[in-house]
Image (cartoon, helix red, strand yellow):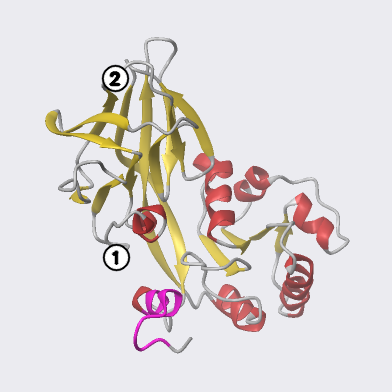
Amino acid sequence: MIGLIAHSEKLDARQLVAALRDELDRRGAEYVMERATAALCGAGSDLDEVQVAACCDLLVVLGGDGTILRVVHRVGASLRPIFGINLGSLGFLTCLGPDEVARAVDAIVTGDFQLSRRSLLKVELITSRAAAQTFYALNDVVISRGERSRLVKIDVRIDGAVFTNFNADGLIVSTPTGSTAYSLSAGGPILLPDTGVFVITPVCPHVLTNRSTVVSDQSIVEARLTVPGQEVFINVDGQASIEMRLDDVLRISQSDRVLPLAMLPERPFSRVLRQKLKWSGSNV
């Protein structure tokens, strides 16, 4: 069973959902739609993202990378393979564009795609105020300052050993998938999806020798604030924002959860990079 989930507020979403539905009907494929997605083409559905994921073998997500991140967070433990069709600007996580519906449906129906197993971070906020909170990140977890223009002072340890103290606007811990997102903007390296590492990247560090560091994804990274009275927040994939206080411990490790992300055999990740970043050899 195929599940259709669209970013209903995208300008071209209505047209794309209708075209995809018509092509799936023509091919005799079985599918269900999330309620807001169904409304775009005048159909009825009472299913939310979690219910769609629970009854489907493959989720077709229409939107950009942010839409895929939203779906990953909403479905939680019911995570299914995702086939993305791009309605956004960059689309590192999507397979095809909105003008390639026929190719998309052919790949979905025939299984002519490969699954890239994308690791997730397990993010635990341990406090003395309440039970530990646990989140999962496909891209990254970010520690950042609030509205006041003050540097954040963060003590970082790796596998229990002192690593360094960052004095910066913030800190990013990213998966290989998230290395082309905020981490890249902050000067971090691009990592291939199957690299098996995390990258720690400070945001505008005060010490010029503080640079991105690549660590094994078997490592446990812990971060603590070192100065009282700082206004600091933790952001997970741009989906969840939580305040962090002085005595809190942010523990980051590899999650048991994995996202099987569909990729077309004729469009390997190296080609995606060339196209999206407009490198030499790109046909865009």
Q: Is residue 120 or residue 189 the one in the foreground?
A: 189
Residue at (76% x, 75% y) in the render: 19
Tally the marks: 2
Element under label 1?
loop
Quadrant of the rendered image containing residue 18:
bottom right
Picture coordinates of residue 64, whole percent (x, y): 58, 62
Q: Are marks 1 and 2 in contact (CB under 8 Å)?
A: no
Magenta stretch: includes residue 281: yes
Work out whether 244 lies above or below 1: above
Q: Which residues are magenta?
A: 271-282
Picture coordinates of residue 84, whole percent (x, y): 56, 66
Badge 2 amino acid: Val
- Residue that carries the numbered disc 1 in the rendered image: 192
- Disc assigned to residue 113: none
Left or right of 30? Residue 200 is left
Picture coordinates of residue 198, whole percent (x, y): 26, 49
